[in-house]
Image (cartoon, rainbow, N blue to C red):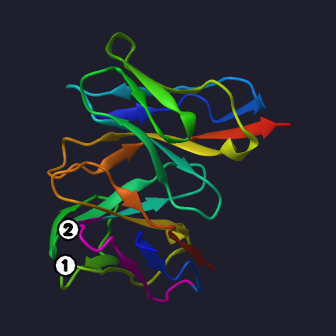
C-alpha cells in the first residue's frame, strides 16, 4: 500500500498526559498537512510542511501542540497536557509540489478521558 | 473571509434515484474547489476537483459537479445512487490566504441510501 499511513489509529489517554501521532506520507510527496476533525464538522487545518520546513500554523495550534518533520519524510504531531477538548480525529494529508491534490490518511482518533 | 458552506447536514435518497449535494463558496477570486468522500474508518477520498476551464467536471465513481460562478455554487451530482455511496461528503476550497494552499472544508453532508 503506497498511500498515506497514520499510527496509531486509535488512542485513549487521560487528561494531562502527552500523546504523539505519526504520519507517513506518500513517498515522493514533499508537502505534508495536519488537520483536525471533530464530530459533525469538516476537517480544520492545523499546520503544513514543505520538506522539513514548517511553513504555516493555524491559530488552532495552541502552544501545547507541536509538529515536526525532521528529515522531510514522516511527521509527528505531539499534544502535551491533553485536555478533553483535544478529543478528535487527527488527519494527515500529503501532496506533491506543483499539484493541488491532497491525499489523506485514515486518521488517528484521540479520546481524552 | 474564505468559506465553504454545505447547507444540508443529512440527505436520504432511494437506491437508483438521482443525487445532488449542495455546496456554496465565498471567495474573492476563482477558487480551487474539491469534493471528498469519507466512509466510516476510511480516509478522505478525492472525488473530483475544479480549477478552471470547463465548469462541468467529471470524477470517480460516476460523480460530477458543476461550478456556477453566478450562484457561488459547486454542487455534486450522480444520476443513479448505489447503496455503496452511503457516506459523508465534504466540499472544500483551497485557501489562498495561506501561503501554500491548505483546504477549507464545509461541515459535510451525510448521505443515507434507502433500499
Q: Quadrant of residue A109?
A: bottom right
Q: Return the residue at label 2.
A: A30
The dot on residue B27 is none
Residue B55 is covered by the magenta coloring: no
Q: Name above or below for residue A25 compared with residue B43.
A: below
| Span highlighted in magenta in the image | A15-32
**Residue neighbourhood size for the residue with mark 2, other residues' Cα within 10 Å, grouped as few (<14), some (14–19), many (≥20):** some
Chain for numbered disc 1: A
Residue closer to the observer: B44 or B23: B44
Query: Does residue A70 appear to the left or right of B22 in the view shown?
Result: left
- Marks 1 and 2: CB-CB under 8 Å? yes
In the orientation shown, which residue stands out farthest toward the right? B115
Q: Name above or below for residue B20 compared with residue B110.
A: above
Q: Return the residue at label 1.
A: A72
Residue closer to the observer: B88 or A44: B88
- Give me the residue at 39% from left, 28% from top: B57
Amino acid at each position: 500500500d503506497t498511500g498515506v499511513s497514520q499510527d496509531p489509529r486509535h488512542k485513549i489517554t487521560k487528561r494531562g498526559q502527552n500523546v504523539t501521532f505519526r504520519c507517513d506520507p506518500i513517498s515522493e510527496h514533499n508537502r505534508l498537512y495536519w488537520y483536525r476533525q471533530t464530530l459533525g464538522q469538516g476537517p480544520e487545518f492545523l499546520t503544513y510542511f514543505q520538506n522539513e520546513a514548517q511553513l504555516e500554523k493555524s491559530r488552532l495550534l495552541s502552544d501545547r501542540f507541536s509538529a515536526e518533520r525532521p528529515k522531510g519524510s514522516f511527521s509527528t504531531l505531539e499534544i502535551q497536557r491533553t485536555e478533553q477538548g483535544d478529543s478528535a480525529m487527527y488527519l494527515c494529508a500529503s501532496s506533491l509540489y506543483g499539484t493541488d491534490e491532497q491525499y489523506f490518511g485514515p486518521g488517528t482518533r484521540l479520546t481524552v478521558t | 473571509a474564505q468559506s465553504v458552506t454545505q447547507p444540508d447536514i443529512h440527505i436520504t435518497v432511494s437506491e437508483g434515484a438521482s443525487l445532488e449535494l449542495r455546496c456554496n463558496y465565498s471567495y474573492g477570486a476563482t477558487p480551487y474547489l474539491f469534493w471528498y468522500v469519507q466512509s466510516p474508518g476510511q480516509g478522505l477520498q478525492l472525488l473530483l476537483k475544479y480549477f478552471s476551464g470547463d465548469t462541468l467536471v467529471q470524477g470517480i465513481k460516476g460523480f460530477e459537479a458543476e461550478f456556477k460562478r453566478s450562484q457561488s455554487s459547486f454542487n455534486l451530482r450522480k444520476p443513479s445512487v448505489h447503496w455503496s455511496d452511503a457516506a459523508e461528503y465534504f466540499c472544500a476550497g483551497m485557501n489562498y490566504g495561506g501561503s501554500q494552499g491548505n483546504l477549507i472544508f464545509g461541515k459535510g453532508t451525510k448521505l443515507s441510501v434507502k433500499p
